[in-house]
Image (spheres, coloured by chain):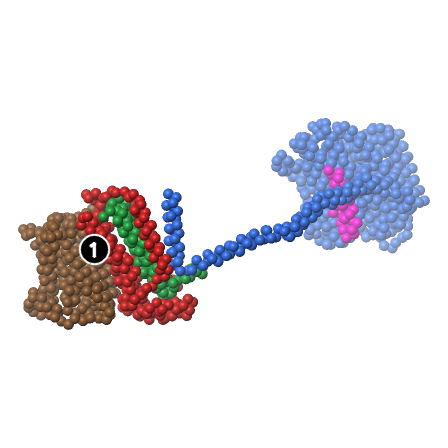
């Protein structure tokens, strides 16, 4: 698939995904608090327009460049992640035999992007949010690493295409039951959501985006949604067999699975409460990481 | 993209790193210089591996080792910085002159 | 001149430029992320050189390392935000000369040496090669690196822990004087103070007039959480 | 039972007494008397039981002890004489150091017993050395008088010189046969036999006070009279005669040995007689007589009758010991040993009686035992030749003369004293004199015959002419002794007689011939050492001093300046180098880089 055909298709898909993510978030959020769902499909678009029209704020001596570019980095990383996802056998935008590693690199850079977003306004709340996020984001990345390596063990390859092909008989979600739940935690951390939202949470008045106003806000939220799409697509690819499925075309299967993962993530976002940072660190290091090791062990034994 | 070009780029990175390591007062900046030098050598290693050795596996191994060295340097370096800061509340090399005695 | 060549020259130029900017910006955070950009460029060059794993791993590792470095910047260093112009250098001319000399010497050596040419074959399974090598012939080396990293983790934790064998490691610590051997400048730490809080002390008082700077940002979750881990469960944050 | 018990008992007891002995006279007398009585019983038992002793030293050397009839006789005699003498010493001698004296006397006796019991030259040497050392210690017993240790040393050196002969003999015998045993000596021949025979003779003569070693006996008089009694009668001196008699069977084969022994003995007998007759010192008179009597024993041995010599040794022991003890009593009472100032017959009549018996035996007046043995010696000498017999007769005349003279002058009728010696002090002499009286039984033919048979002694045959002549001459000698004591009691105090009384000038001769040359040699050697050997060293010293002065004057600048200059340069360089040590890590880092660059340049140029 050439770049010229693939990139527009990818961006189109991403746009749809963005809308879906926003709509899902709105609808489920309202459902859970018991409010009528209403026009959940269009409300996000309205919000965008409203935010665009809102007054733009600025801080004293910010790092303008990085403040401006941080959502861009974030979005770019989401695009890279989505580009790694195969839509059909041997059909992914970035044909790399180490796509799993590159996705890991993208995850690592996400932490950098979020930190830059919090650091560049030169204001206390965003900076605190950035710090907290770094403390949580880095160990969560370890989880992602182990889980994805475990998923690539049956494929005997670090290529997501091969990972999908290896699930023709059995999806990884069955083969490695611990993998998907852990990766959902990673997705939430990558998208600053729910229990893992230490960057943009309400207790810091918005955290890294506390000083964002207008277009900046829109851009940042868009990037978050894009990352949600990308991460869910990766999750669907690595654990739910990606494009594999009967009758329907592969890209549709992938989209459906991605949507399913997105629903799960949004549900978790709204249902699971957030812990203090220290407790979360303990949870990650003492509980989740050993579980990830166990996952790796299961994968290894299965490969034998 | 020739090997010479890659090596010259790596030499440039190395030279910049050396400049930084020699000139910076701050511990962290000094370590950045070291990292940059290692960056240059990593690039050179990859270049040799790719263009001069026909992809001999040992070349990749060397690059991995260089990365491990980077990680170790960083971890121990930061631990030392923390320890020194605790003791001296200092973050510049000039604060440590005990070696003169 | 293929697209690969163009990409290579662009990335090379970017790597060198960002590498140079590392030591030219006022903000240390910027310096850190410039360095990350330099590394990323090198990683991408690695991808161009068909070192797919190495390139990706370089980006991956350096992102984490630079993130940690950035944290330390803000924790310990003056002027993290780069609000003031800053030039903290010594033996500057010597350093420049040394860097240039090294570069010239290496370039000369590169240009004068007849370099072998044996590019990696397009169908060579480099990733598989690497795996076989790491867990085959060079397993001992690889495992040694692993053990060394483990020792590094332990050493880093021990070195950076505030709990020393003989009480708090910062007991009796005195900030350096403004001049050599002068009286201590700045705040002295309280004995047995709250854990994990380096933050909030009022700067180093000038450092020989090299420019004012604001207090170091608080909230140091100390140690390297991301990379060397280990002491994460007492992550003192807060500030 | 082992024969070692007999010497070991007095030895160990002596050491114990010397070290821890009681101060009380009676206790000392009881203990020492008991020990010696036990020794005597043991000796008798050993003789009766035929005990032997052997000790494997290792390396082919063994100490052995075995008795022959002759040595059995002496073995019994030694403790028998030592018993009364030692008891007397404990009861009479000065209180100071008495336990040491008594203990040493016991040790002395033990050493003598060892000599007697020895069956090889090594054991003999051990005993020999022991009695030599004991004699030195005993003669110098009263060491606070400075002359006494000197006298002890004199005696020791003199006998020690003789010991060299025994050492020589022992080494030669061992070298030739690989054994020290007496039995092995029989197989010796040629020069080795000569060395052994004359070595033993030298040793025996020096111990027995024969010419020319006689003077040490006079010096030995410095010791207490009990010591003199023991030394002359039973131990040291007797050892010389004994060893010749004991080894006669094996040594007489050596060329000219018998004649030499005979000559030495006869010369000593005559010279000793003259000296004794002319002597005015009571103990020295007796010492001279000892030499003379031992000389007679040598004559008997040289004539081929060692058994006769042994018999005379026994008889001599029993009469010489009381004489010494009596002389000691008299001398202590009078405060002097000058014969012309004693005459203590009335003061100590019992002692005088005992001395009379012993003196008559010494004078060889029948029927006393001493007379019988002397006549037997005459018979032996007769067998050797008329001239020898004549010499023995002359010696007999002189012994009669000095014995009479001693008796009359020492215990003649003089002033009475209200105080007689206490009984304990005179028990010893009385007992010994009693034994002398008992020995008179030797005149009875069956007794002497049985004894000779028992001891395996061949008694010589003699003519009546010589016996008659001898008795006549003895009577004449006795008469002349009476005459001399009456007419010139102070004989030997001055003039030619006095000079002759000191061993006819033999000590002077020894002094002139041996001591002075030695001293001169030593002096000249010392001066040679001072001038020649020392001179070289002095010259070296002078040279070195000159060199040191010179080098100090001129070499200082060079030798000192060089290191000092180096040090200054080094310290300058060090100061400069220290400036590199800034403590600043970036400086060090720069040095490192520079060094690394140098290495690379070096390698590049080298490659």
Q: Is residue D170 above or below residue A111?
A: above
Q: What residue appears at the point 73 percent right and 32 percent down from the top-left corner?
A: D195
State the hue of chain B: green
Q: Secondary structure at mark 1?
A: helix
Q: What residue appears at the point 36 percent right and 65 percent down from the top-left corner?
A: B90
What is the crowding at mark 1: few (fewer than 14 residues within 10 Å), some, or many (at least 20)? many
State the hue of chain A: brown
Q: How many marks?
A: 1
Q: Is residue D502 above or below residue C187?
A: above
**Foreground residue, D555 or C32?**
D555
Image coordinates of residue C27 in percent, x first then y, are 28, 64
**Foreground residue, A95 or C139?**
A95
Mainly helix, strand or loop, the magenta region? Answer: helix
Q: Chain letter for red, please.
A: C
Chain for mark 1?
A: A
Q: What residue appears at the point 70 percent right and 52 percent down from the top-left corner?
A: D21
**Foreground residue, C112 or A77?**
C112
What is the span of residues highlighted in magenta in the rendered image? Answer: D136-164
Tell me the quadrant of the picture where the C terminus of chain D can be found.
Answer: top left
In the picture of the structure, the residue carrying the numbered disc 1 is A104
Indicate left or right for A162 with D529 as reference. Answer: left
Image coordinates of residue A6 in percent, x first then y, are 11, 53
Q: Chain letter for blue, please.
A: D
Residue D378 visible? The answer is yes
């Amino acid at each position: 698939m050439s770049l010229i055909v693939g990139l527009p298709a990818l961006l189109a898909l991403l746009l749809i995904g963005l809308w879906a993510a926003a709509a899902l978030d709105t609808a489920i959020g309202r459902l859970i608090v018991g409010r009528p769902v209403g026009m959940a499909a269009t409300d996000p678009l309205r919000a965008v327009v409203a935010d665009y029209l809102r007054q733009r704020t600025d801080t004293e001596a910010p790092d303008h460049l990085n403040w401006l570019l941080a959502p861009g980095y974030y979005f770019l990383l989401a695009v890279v992640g989505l580009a790694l996802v195969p839509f059909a056998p041997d059909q992914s935008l970035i044909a790399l035999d180490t796509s799993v590693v590159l996705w890991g690199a993208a995850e690592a850079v996400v932490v950098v992007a979020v930190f830059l977003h919090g650091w560049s306004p030169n204001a206390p709340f965003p900076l605190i949010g950035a710090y907290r996020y770094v403390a949580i984001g880095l160990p969560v990345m370890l989880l992602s690493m182990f889980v994805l390596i475990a998923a690539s063990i049956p494929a005997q390859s670090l290529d997501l295409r091969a990972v999908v092909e290896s699930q023709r008989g059995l999806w990884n979600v069955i083969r490695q039951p611990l993998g998907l739940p852990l990766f959902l935690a990673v997705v939430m951390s990558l998208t600053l959501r729910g229990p893992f939202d230490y960057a943009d949470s309400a207790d810091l008045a918005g955290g890294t985006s506390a000083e964002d106003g207008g277009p900046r806000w829109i851009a940042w939220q868009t990037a978050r949604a894009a990352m949600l799409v990308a991460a869910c697509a990766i999750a669907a690819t690595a654990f739910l067999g990606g494009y594999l499925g009967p009758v329907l075309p592969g890209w549709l299967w992938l989209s459906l699975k991605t949507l399913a993962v997105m629903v799960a993530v949004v549900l978790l976002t709204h249902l699971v409460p957030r812990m203090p940072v220290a407790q979360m660190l303990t949870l990650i290091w003492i509980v989740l990481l050993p579980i990830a090791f166990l996952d790796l062990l299961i994968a290894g034994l299965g490969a034998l | 993209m020739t090997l010479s070009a890659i090596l010259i780029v790596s030499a440039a990175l190395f030279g910049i790193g050396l400049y930084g390591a020699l000139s910076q007062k701050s511990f962290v900046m000094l370590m950045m210089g070291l990292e940059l030098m290692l960056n240059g050598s990593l690039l050179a290693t990859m270049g040799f591996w790719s263009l001069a050795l026909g992809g001999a596996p040992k070349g990749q191994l060397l690059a991995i080792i260089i990365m491990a060295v980077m990680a170790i340097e960083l971890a121990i370096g930061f631990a030392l910085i923390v320890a020194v800061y605790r003791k001296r509340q200092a973050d510049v090399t000039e604060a440590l002159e005990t070696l003169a005695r | 001149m293929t697209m690969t060549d163009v990409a290579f020259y662009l990335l090379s130029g970017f790597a060198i430029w960002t590498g140079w900017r590392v030591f030219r910006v006022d903000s240390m955070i910027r310096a850190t992320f410039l360095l990350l950009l330099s590394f990323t460029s090198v990683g991408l060059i690695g991808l161009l050189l068909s070192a797919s794993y190495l390139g990706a791993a370089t980006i991956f590792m350096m992102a984490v390392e630079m993130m940690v470095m950035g944290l330390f910047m803000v924790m310990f260093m003056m002027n993290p935000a780069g609000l003031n112009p800053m030039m903290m250098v010594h033996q500057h001319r010597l350093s420049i000369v040394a860097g240039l000399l090294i570069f010239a010497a290496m370039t000369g050596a590169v240009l004068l040496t007849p370099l072998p040419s044996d590019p990696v074959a397009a169908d060579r399974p480099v990733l598989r090669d690497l795996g076989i090598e790491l867990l085959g012939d060079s397993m001992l080396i690889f495992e040694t690196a692993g053990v060394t990293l483990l020792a590094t983790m332990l050493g880093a934790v021990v070195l950076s822990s505030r709990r020393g064998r003989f009480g708090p490691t910062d007991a009796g610590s005195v900030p350096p004087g403004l001049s050599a051997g002068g009286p201590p400048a700045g705040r002295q730490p309280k004995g047995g103070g709250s854990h994990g809080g380096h933050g909030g002390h009022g700067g180093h008082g000038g450092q020989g007039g090299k420019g004012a700077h604001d207090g170091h940002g608080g909230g140091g979750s100390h140690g390297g959480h991301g990379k060397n881990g280990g002491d994460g469960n007492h992550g003192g944050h807060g500030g | 039972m082992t024969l070692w018990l007999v010497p070991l008992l007095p030895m160990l007891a002596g050491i114990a007494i010397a070290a821890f002995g009681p101060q009380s006279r009676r206790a000392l007398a009881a203990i020492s008397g008991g020990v010696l009585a036990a020794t005597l019983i043991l000796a008798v038992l050993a003789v009766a039981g035929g005990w032997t002793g052997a000790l494997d030293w290792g390396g082919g050397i063994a100490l052995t002890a075995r008795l022959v009839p002759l040595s059995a006789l002496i073995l019994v005699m030694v403790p028998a004489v030592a018993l009364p003498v030692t008891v007397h010493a404990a009861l009479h001698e000065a209180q100071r150091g008495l336990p040491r004296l008594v203990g040493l006397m016991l040790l002395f006796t033990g050493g003598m017993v060892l000599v007697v019991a020895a069956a090889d030259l090594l054991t003999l040497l051990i005993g020999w050395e022991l009695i030599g050392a004991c004699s030195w210690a005993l003669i110098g017993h009263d060491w606070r008088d400075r002359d006494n240790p000197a006298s002890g040393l004199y005696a020791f050196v003199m006998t020690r010189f003789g010991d060299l002969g025994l050492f020589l003999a022992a080494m030669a015998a061992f070298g030739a046969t690989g054994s020290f045993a007496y039995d092995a000596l029989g197989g010796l021949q040629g020069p080795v036999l000569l060395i052994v025979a004359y070595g033993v003779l030298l040793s025996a003569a020096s111990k027995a006070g024969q010419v020319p070693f006689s003077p040490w006996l006079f010096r030995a008089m410095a010791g207490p009279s009990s010591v003199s009694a023991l030394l002359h009668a039973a131990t040291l001196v007797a050892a010389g005669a004994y060893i010749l008699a004991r080894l006669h069977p094996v040594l007489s084969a050596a060329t000219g040995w018998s004649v030499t022994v005979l000559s030495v003995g006869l010369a000593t007998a005559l010279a000793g007689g003259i000296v004794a007759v002319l002597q005015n010192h009571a103990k020295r008179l007796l010492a001279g007589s000892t030499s003379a009597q031992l000389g007679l024993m040598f004559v008997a041995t040289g004539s081929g009758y060692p058994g006769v010599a042994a018999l005379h040794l026994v008889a001599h022991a029993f009469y010489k010991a009381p004489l010494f003890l009596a002389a000691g009593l008299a001398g202590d009472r009078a405060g002097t040993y000058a014969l012309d100032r004693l005459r203590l017959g009335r003061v100590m009549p019992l002692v005088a009686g005992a001395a009379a018996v012993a003196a008559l035996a010494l004078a060889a007046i029948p029927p006393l035992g001493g007379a019988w043995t002397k006549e037997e010696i005459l018979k032996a000498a007769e067998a050797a030749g008329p001239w020898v017999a004549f010499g023995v007769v002359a010696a007999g005349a002189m012994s009669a003369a000095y014995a009479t003279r001693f008796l009359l002058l020492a215990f003649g009728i003089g002033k009475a004293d209200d105080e007689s010696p206490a009984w304990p002090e005179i028990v010893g002499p009385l007992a010994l004199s009693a034994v002398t009286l008992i020995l008179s039984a030797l005149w009875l033919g069956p007794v002497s015959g049985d004894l000779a048979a028992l001891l395996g002694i061949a008694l010589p045959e003699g003519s009546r002419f010589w016996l008659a002549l001898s008795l006549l001459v003895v009577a004449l000698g006795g008469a002349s002794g009476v005459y001399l004591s009456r007419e010139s009691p102070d004989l030997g105090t001055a003039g030619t007689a006095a000079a002759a009384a000191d061993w006819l000038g033999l000590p002077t001769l020894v002094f002139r011939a041996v001591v002075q040359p030695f001293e001169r040699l030593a002096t000249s050697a010392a001066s040679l050492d001072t001038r020649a050997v020392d001179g070289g060293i002095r010259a070296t010293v002078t040279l070195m001093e000159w060199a040191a002065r010179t080098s100090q004057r001129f070499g200082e600048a060079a030798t000192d300046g060089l290191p000092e200059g180096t040090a200054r340069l080094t310290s300058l360089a060090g100061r400069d180098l220290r400036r590199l040590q800034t403590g600043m890590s970036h400086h060090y880092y720069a040095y490192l880089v520079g060094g690394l660059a140098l290495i690379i340049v070096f390698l590049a140029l080298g490659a």
